[in-house]
Image: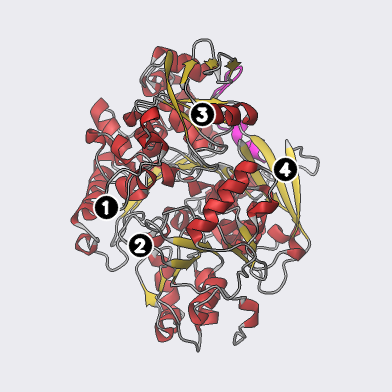
């Protein structure tokens, strides 16, 4: 599948090294100011503005929808500059108050901007998310962003391909987040470097689109710039009727093409990995890399058992930063706060899973729920999920990246331990000296109502 | 992009593996204009105490590594966020090359576009180099892009891989946007064919 999409987008092929690839969609956010400054300095215009979509997410205030709600005037200024750049470039954009606003990797699929077979770029490493619909989507830097804005193309080396097949069946209470954390724990944070991952197998096939988005989202945490899943009827049903999806005759035409995308049975990959999906348990991270994930009923690993001296030293430093001891059980570890949100886990199914745990319970620690888009927020409110969260004592906020990347002023305080549905437990990611434990929305909700890392399977949920 | 041919300079050995771009520049500095340079934010939370004074144990604050223009790091350097600010911070601080067993893919692309040389070397070579740099007294390393070699303080020389396209671009300081605009006719021809085949994709 990867090769089919790649080959049909080559504008200039070379004997070796990078090819010039055509970009179908570029999604931009506030961080793109460097690229726009470059364009303006050169006196160049945006070449295909209709193929670019903008949304305010990284710096978006979660307290309200006005520039004045920004945590500081400087943060408000970044959003104002973004609006200005979008107008200057003639780019369709979803500003703070727009009903289509949201995290770029949530709104792409939600609005039907993301489609099978498209090349999609965004100056954000989690752009692999869009591969869940069978798109070739990857994160780029600001120099590359400027090049795409100016030419709608990009010089790119063809990556090698890696198929990860998840066999068996997911157990009850096991989420897509647990599946991807288990994969990253197995192959390592550098495990898929230089590769495009295609996820396959019965566990992946049985997933909803939102679950597939969670899996593809974290490909970059295993060092893969691309993560994708072959499109199927679930994909086509999901897309049908969405605002920017093809309609009428165009829909039929697109559908015919999309059905040709999945690889043949005999498709060959540079590398193959198989994972037993039946043995996956609810996962939590203990360290400062997403590869540091273990089942909730496991103990903090002992760095002494690691063979490689550098890994040993690294794990020791992680444990010191996380204030954990080798052999300590993960379950029962007291936490200070909970964050439910991010491009990994902020869609309606994520919020429903969290609400099922919150229902009839009270939070033991502060918890904030940040929907992935304004549309997800409205949908949750229509289903009464906002009442469930608020009755439990959690904060129900406006959509954006928020405490996942801590750029909008939402931060974990120094030394605090946060149960988070985001994608990165890096040192200082959620704020200087913040300690992050990654997990699924249901597990984060279980942590919120118990004040500890807890196995959600032991908390009875009303049907 | 800025051109680079060769440089001989003090090389600083950075501890750790999987050094992500959040470590290279914390997100809170990214909204700032680059006019004053991002070098002051490089490894900020490792380089400085919370109140702002330099942490004496951090490698770039040690007197023997003052003026370092080459960095030696563990595997998967620059993983994580796509922020090009991480490369801006290294370049603005004065770093010309990073030697490591492997790099994050997006960081690797961003580095090439800014004339920062990502030098991939075998794990064993990097590991021994780090030991040698910590021990001293010789701490100078040469990176020669034209010859595609690095020369270590002990005098040993190693060839490193770099794609010929990017090597040429960096040696000559080629501007990527200008270069690509030279292909506009081919891009337009591609769009014409593509519009026929997949009319739902190319929006006018």
Give the left or right position of residue A303, taking residue A344 as reference. Answer: right
Sequence order check, earlier mark of 1 and 3: 1
Please give the label number shown on residue B116: none
Which callout, 3 or 4, points to the residue nearer the camera? Answer: 3
Which callout, 4 or 1, points to the residue nearer the camera? Answer: 1
- Where does residue B162 sit, x and y in percent of width and height? 55, 20
Q: Are marks 1 and 2 on the same chain?
A: no
On the image, numbered disc 1 is attached to which residue? Answer: B51
Judged from this view, the residue extending furthest toward the top is B147
The structure residue drawn at horizontal position 50% and vertical position 39%, both measured from the top left corner, is: B15
Of A263 and A395, nearer the camera is A395
On the image, numbered disc 2 is attached to which residue? Answer: A411
Chain letter of the residue beneath label 4 in the structure image: A
The structure residue drawn at horizontal position 59% and vertical position 26%, both measured from the top left corner, is: B121
A17 versus A30 height, above or below: above
The structure residue drawn at horizontal position 24% and vertical position 39%, both measured from the top left corner, is: B33
Residue at mark 2 to residue at mark 3: CA–CA distance: 40 Å
- Where does residue A89 sit, x and y in percent of width and height? 28, 39
Locate the N terminus of chain A by quadrant: top right
Q: Quadrant of residue A453?
A: bottom right
Q: Is residue A298 visible?
A: yes
On the image, numbered disc 3 is attached to which residue? Answer: B135
Sequence order check, earlier mark of 4 and 2: 4
Chain letter of the residue beneath label 1 in the structure image: B
Locate the C terminus of chain A by quadrant: bottom right
A461 versus B68 height, above or below: below
Give the left or right position of residue A339, taking residue A185 as reference. Answer: left
């Amino acid at each position: 599948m990867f090769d089919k999409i790649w080959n049909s987008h080559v504008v200039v092929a070379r004997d070796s090294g990078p090819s010039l690839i055509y970009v179908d969609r570029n999604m931009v956010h506030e961080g793109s100011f460097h690229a726009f400054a470059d364009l303006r300095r050169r006196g160049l215009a945006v070449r295909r503005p209709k193929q670019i979509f903008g949304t305010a997410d990284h710096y978006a205030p979660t307290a309200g929808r006005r520039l004045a709600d920004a945590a500081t005037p400087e943060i408000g200024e970044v959003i104002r500059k973004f609006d200005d750049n979008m107008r200057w470039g003639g780019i369709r954009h979803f500003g703070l108050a727009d009903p289509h606003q949201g995290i770029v990797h949530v709104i792409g699929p939600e609005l039907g901007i993301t489609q099978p077979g498209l090349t999609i770029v965004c100056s954000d490493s989690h752009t692999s998310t869009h591969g869940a619909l069978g798109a070739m989507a990857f994160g780029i830097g600001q120099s590359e962003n400027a090049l795409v804005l100016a030419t709608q193309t990009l010089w790119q080396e063809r990556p090698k391909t890696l198929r990860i097949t998840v066999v068996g069946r997911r157990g009850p209470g096991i989420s897509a987040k647990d599946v991807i954390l288990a994969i990253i724990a197995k192959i390592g944070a550098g495990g898929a470097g230089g590769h495009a991952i295609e996820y396959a197998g019965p566990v992946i096939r049985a997933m909803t689109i939102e679950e597939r988005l969670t899996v593809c989202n974290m490909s970059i945490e295993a060092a893969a710039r691309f993560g994708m899943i072959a499109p199927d009827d679930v994909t086509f049903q999901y897309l049908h009727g969405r605002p920017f999806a093809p309609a009428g005759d165009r829909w039929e035409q697109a559908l015919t093409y999309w059905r040709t995308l999945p690889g043949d049975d005999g498709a060959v990959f540079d590398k193959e990995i198989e994972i037993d999906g039946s043995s996956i348990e609810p996962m939590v991270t203990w360290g400062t890399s997403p590869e540091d994930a273990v089942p909730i009923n496991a103990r903090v690993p002992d760095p002494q058992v690691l063979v490689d001296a550098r890994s040993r030293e690294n794990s020791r430093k992680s444990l010191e930063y996380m204030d954990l001891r080798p052999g300590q059980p993960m379950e029962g570890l007291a936490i200070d706060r909970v964050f439910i949100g991010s491009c990994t886990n902020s869609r309606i199914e994520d919020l429903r899973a969290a609400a099922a745990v919150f229902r009839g319970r009270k939070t033991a620690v502060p918890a904030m729920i940040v929907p992935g888009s304004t549309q997800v927020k409205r949908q949750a409110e229509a289903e009464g999920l906002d009442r469930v969260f608020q009755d439990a004592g959690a904060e129900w906020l406006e959509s954006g990246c928020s405490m996942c990347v801590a750029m909008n002023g939402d931060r974990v305080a120094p030394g605090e331990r946060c149960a988070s549905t985001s994608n990165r437990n890096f040192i200082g990611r959620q704020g200087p000296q913040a300690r992050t434990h990654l997990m699924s929305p249901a597990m984060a909700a279980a942590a919120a109502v118990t004040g500890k890392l807890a196995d959600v399977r032991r908390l009875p949920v009303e049907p | 992009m800025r051109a680079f041919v060769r440089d001989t300079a003090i090389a600083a050995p950075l501890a750790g593996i999987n050094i992500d771009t959040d470590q290279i520049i914390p997100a809170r500095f990214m909204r700032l204009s680059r006019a004053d340079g991002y070098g002051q934010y490089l490894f900020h939370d490792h380089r400085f105490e919370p109140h702002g004074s330099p942490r004496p144990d951090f490698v770039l604050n040690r007197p023997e590594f003052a003026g370092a223009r080459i960095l030696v790091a563990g595997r998967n350097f620059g993983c994580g966020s796509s922020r090009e600010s991480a490369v801006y911070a290294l370049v603005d601080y004065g770093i010309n090359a990073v030697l490591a067993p492997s790099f994050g893919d997006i960081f690797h692309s961003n580095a090439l576009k800014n004339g920062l040389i990502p030098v991939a070397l075998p794990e064993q070579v990097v590991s021994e180099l780090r030991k040698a740099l910590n021990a001293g007294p010789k701490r100078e390393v040469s990176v020669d892009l034209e010859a595609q070699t690095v020369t270590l303080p002990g005098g040993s020389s190693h060839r490193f891989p770099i794609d010929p396209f990017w090597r040429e671009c960096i040696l000559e300081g080629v501007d990527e946007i200008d270069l690509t605009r030279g292909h506009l006719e081919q891009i337009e021809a591609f769009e014409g064919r593509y519009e026929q085949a997949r009319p739902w994709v190319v929006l006018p």
